[in-house]
Amino acid sequence: MLILSEWRKTGQLRIFFFRLKRKFAVSKLFNPLLFHNKLLINKALAGLLFTHKLKLFTIMKNLGSIVLVALMVFASSFTTKTQSVHEVEADIVDLAVATDFLSTLVAAVKAGDLVDVLKGEGPFTVFAPTNEAFAKLPAGTVENLLKPENKAQLVAVLTYHVVPGKIMSKDLKNGQTAATVQGKKITVTLKDGKAMINNATVTAADIEASNGVVHVIDTVILPPM
């Protein structure tokens, strides 16, 4: 509407200029003063016309900028957006080996010949007891479990800490149960902002691996007899 108004103003000035020109073409023969005034009016009208044209050009330029910005925004809505994706290369065993406070668990996994299993495709969810968690067991328990003759018992304890599938902390619900690789179920308890697996508290959650996820716990959980 603003541009149309400017065009109209310019057109009206041109008509007014034309009429004045005709008037002075007749009157200049009889009145030299009018002829002089005509020159002054011509200059004034020319300046006014130039001002309106400049204003119109400015409006068109600004409109062009607005249209260009709008086109850029419109085009960007169709641009494929890329997201930064963190690719986890280490599997569950590699993560445990690289973590000092899980060294006892690593030794137990090796003694139970479960390395290849936990390096498999999965996915697995592992509730990993810390070295301190193993230390809380009765004296001599870990040493006995690591003996070759107690391998079956060791495997039962370790696989009780493994659940098939990838279960993140956000997936845990109070009272939830999950079947472990060992066969028996574990129970989840959510209380006071903490998550517990049976009688163990989760101290670090959602440590992602290439073949699953690890949740660190402060107590070794034992399968029911």
Image: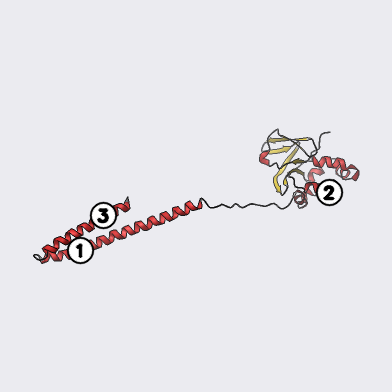
Quarter containing the C terminus: top right
Sequence-earlier tag: 2 or 3:
3
Give the Cα distance between marks 2 and 3.
91 Å
Residue 33 placement, left or right of 217 = left
Instruction: Say the numbered circle drawn on residue 42.
Output: 1
> Amino acid type of disc 2?
Lys
Q: Which residue is mark 3?
A: 9
Q: How is the image coloured?
A: secondary structure
Residue 138 image offset from top left, x and y in percent: 85, 40
Q: Which residue is mark 2?
A: 110
Task: Return the residue nearer the eye: 127 or 103.
Answer: 127
Q: Secondary structure at mark 3?
A: helix
Question: Which mark lies nearer to you, 1 or 2?
Answer: 1
> Do we see residue 140 in this rendering?
no
Crowdedness near tag 2: few (<14), some (14–19) or many (≥20) residues, C-alpha within 10 Å: some
Identify the residue at image location x=34%, y=58%.
Answer: 58
Sequence-earlier tag: 1 or 2:
1
Residue 198 image offset from top left, x and y in percent: 75, 36
